[in-house]
Structure formats: C-alpha cells, structure tokens
Image (spheres, grey):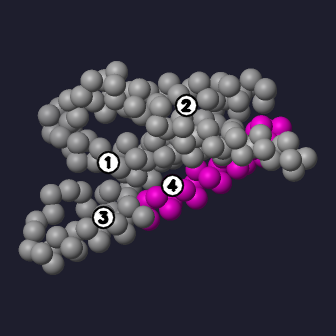
Amino acid sequence: MRRIQFEKTADYIREIVFGLEDSLVSTLGVVTGIAVGTNDKPLVILSAFIVIFVEAVSMAAGTYLSTKSYIEVEEAQHMANQGPGPAQASFVMGFFYILGGFIPVLSYWIFPLSVAINASIILTAITLFLVGAIKSFWTKRSWVRSGIEMLVVSLAAASIGFAIGRLGNKYLNI
C-alpha cells in the first residue's frame, strides 16, 4: 500500500512541486512588495487572498488545458497516456497552490507588519528548501542540493516583488 502511494505521488510530482513553488514565490513576492510599498497590513492580507485564489484557479485551469492538450497529441500519434488525467492533475495543482500560498501569509496574521515581513521571508525560505529536499525522495538526487536549488532559484524570483515595492514606496509616495 505504501509503495502504491509513493508511486502515485510520483505521478503528480510536477503539479505538486510547481504548485507549491509558484504559490510560495508569487505570494511572497506580492505580500512583501505590498508590505514594503504601503505599510498597510489589511491590504497585504487582502491582496494575498486575491492572489492565492485567482492564481490557484488559473494554474488549475492551465494544468487542465495543457494536460488535455498533451493527451490529445499523444492520442493523435497513437501513443498511450502514461501520466495523470487533466482533471486529476488540475485538482492537484490547485490544491497545492492554495496550500503553499498560505505559508507566506501566516506571519501577517500573527505579527505586526514590521515583524511579519521578515518572518514571512524566513518561513517561506524554509518551506522552499524543504520542498526541494523532499522532492529528492523521488528524484534520487542530493536532498541538500535539491533544497538549495529550490531556495536560490525561487527567492531570486520573489525578490522582484520586494524591489518593486521599495521603488513604489520611494518614488510613488504611497
């Protein structure tokens, strides 16, 4: 039974990793940018909810359509689909997107804005490293290298939100 679950997770590893990573990075970038740009905690939390749910539905829809297109191409070329179906893949993508999106927001519910910004970055960084490390169970690569790769690539992308928020605060007098 455990082997079947392990193999089933491998079928959805793309959607799990993509959903978690993208939601962690997108949500962190948005909340950090809005937090440093506006210093408005309710706006940060509202924006996070909007981003999480709009992007989760968008990513799920994109996964459904792209998976369905891929299967249609396979069928047109008389190949058998080896992966998950579009409905299952889109559900997994949406679920893990929502799950990951709440990690960067947790700090804003608990702490004052001045503390929440750094706490959110740290919590998200730890989560990104863990996602990369856990992924190594299926990829059979070094868990340390996998975790560091996920952390560095993802935080580089998330830093754009911080930079734009700082620029907005400085030059737009928000």
- Looking at numbered disc 3 in the image, what kind of residue is underneath it? Thr
Mark 1 near mark 4, Cβ–Cβ under 8 Å? Answer: no
Disc 2 packing (10 Å; few <14; some 14–19; many ≥20): many
The image quarter in which residue 78 lies: bottom left
The magenta region covers: 34-61
Residue 147, labelled with which disc? none
Relative height, residue 147 to residue 171 (above, below): above
Q: What is the CA distance from the residue labelled 3 to the residue labelled 1?
A: 11 Å
Quick one: SS at disc 3?
A: helix
**Closer to the camera, 93 or 147?**
147
Q: Is residue 135 left or right of residue 25?
A: left
Q: Is residue 165 left or right of residue 30?
A: right
Residue 67, labelled with which disc? 3
Quick one: SS at disc 1?
A: helix
Instruction: Say whether disc 4 or disc 3 marks the residue closer to the N-terminus.
Output: 4
- Does the image show residue 133? no
Mark 3 near mark 1, Cβ–Cβ under 8 Å? Answer: no
Relative height, residue 70 to residue 117 (above, below): below
Q: Which residue is mark 2?
A: 124
Q: Which residue is mark 1?
A: 14
Q: Main secondary structure of the magenta part?
A: helix
Relative height, residue 100 to residue 120 (above, below): below
Front: mark 1 or 4 = 1
Residue visible at 65% across and 54% down in the picture: 50
Instruction: Say whether disc 3 or disc 1 marks the residue closer to the N-terminus.
Output: 1
- Looking at numbered disc 2 in the image, what kind of residue is underneath it? Thr
Can you give x and y, in whole percent of width and height, for residue 105 in the image?
64, 37
Mark 3 near mark 2, Cβ–Cβ under 8 Å? Answer: no
Can you give x and y, in whole percent of width and height, for residue 73 in the image?
21, 73
- Looking at numbered disc 4 in the image, what kind of residue is underneath it? Ala
Q: Which residue is mark 4?
A: 56
Residue 22 within the magenta-colored segment of the rendering: no
